[in-house]
Image (spheres, rainbow, N blue to C red):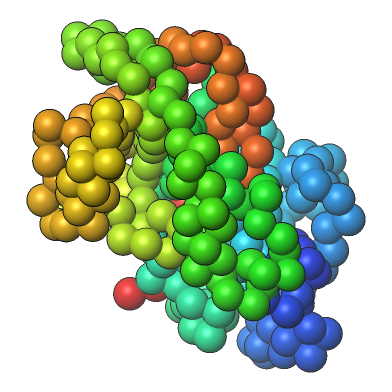
Amino acid sequence: MEHDLLIYNPKSGRTGLKDDFLGRIVQELTENGTMVTVYQTQNKGDAKEYIKRKQIRFDKIICCGGDGTLHEVVNGIMEIEERNILAYIPSGSTNDCAKNIGITKENAVYFIKRKEITIIDLGIFNGEYFNYIAAFGAFTNIPFITSQKIKNILGYFAYLLEGVKHLSDIKGKYIKVLLDDKIWIEDNIVLGMITNSFSVAGIKNRTRNITKLDDGKLEYLFVKMPENLIELQLLITSLLSEKLDEKYIYFGQVEKMHLESEEMEWTLDGENGGIHKQVEIQAVQKVLNMIVGE
């Protein structure tokens, strides 16, 4: 008999996790005789610590929550000797990781039962794993200054609305970046993203045409600080188009990166990634066994 661990965050999603939704999930997961141990997270970082101290061997770890909860679960799994199979039931506001693997709140249990597993990449940011994005600069702090109530109601549109309110606060960060020990970038950057994702904050990633989740590479995108309103308009047009303009944007693929700057805030998978002056980022190829959708 299989024995799975279901970790869920009761506060994720647009209305939080309802008891009837959780009950339905448990019922569907146990229909074929599988035993399920359920653990409700209590505080930030709780999911990771619970996985690290668990005593029972589980066949799968199932995460039910948003991208932040999944971030904790992945870091917990990567710190234990036995790398469990990971399944995901998305219930957050944007669920970028779920979109990557073809999973929705409605079809997740179906695919968990089908057990289609693929081995995907992760990124490492100064020793911490991330699933789909490490970012700095304009608008990357929006998840923390947007109220949870508004995010729950509007989803990723809340991020856009909050971003418009802070357009006048745009300031560049002077960075020095070494890509794969051979490409050097030194410039004033307004937004930087290192991703392994087809979408970010619910919006399609403009480097998605070169993105693969298991190629051992991350995609980078650095947006130059515009010098005037005309450049800002052209920059926004480039970001929204299918063709990125190299005059305003650096982009490509990288296996590892060294970045230096003044002290600045980072986000990892939409969560607070701390303040750093030096950052080491690296892709780790085919390291996470994950149940995927179509």
Residue 262 as seen in the image, left or right of residue 282:
right
- How far across and how far down the image is residue 34, in percent? 70, 77
Residue 57 as seen in the image, left or right of residue 74:
right
Q: Residue furthest front?
A: 229
Please tell me which residue lies in front, 18 or 84.
Answer: 18
Q: Residue placed at 77% from the left, 50% from the top? A: 47
Q: Which residue lies furthest to the right in this view?
A: 42
Residue 18 as seen in the image, left or right of residue 64:
right
Which of the 4 image quarters holds residue 102? bottom left
Residue 169 in view of the camera: yes
| Number of disc labels | 0
- How far across and how far down the image is residue 182, in percent? 19, 9
Q: In which quarter of the image is the C terminus?
A: bottom left
Please tell me which residue lies in front, 246 or 11.
Answer: 246
Looking at the image, residue 139 lies above or below residue 79: below
Residue 93 as seen in the image, left or right of residue 181:
right
Which of the 4 image quarters holds residue 185? top left
- How far across and how far down the image is residue 153, in percent? 64, 77
Which of the 4 image quarters holds residue 60? bottom right
- How far across and how far down the image is residue 254, in percent? 26, 27
Q: Residue placed at 58% from the left, 15% from the top? A: 263
Q: Residue placed at 52% from the left, 12% from the top? A: 262
Q: Residue placed at 38% from the left, 15% from the top? A: 175
Residue 3 in view of the camera: no
Looking at the image, residue 39 lies above or below residue 106: above
Q: Quadrant of the N terminus?
A: bottom right
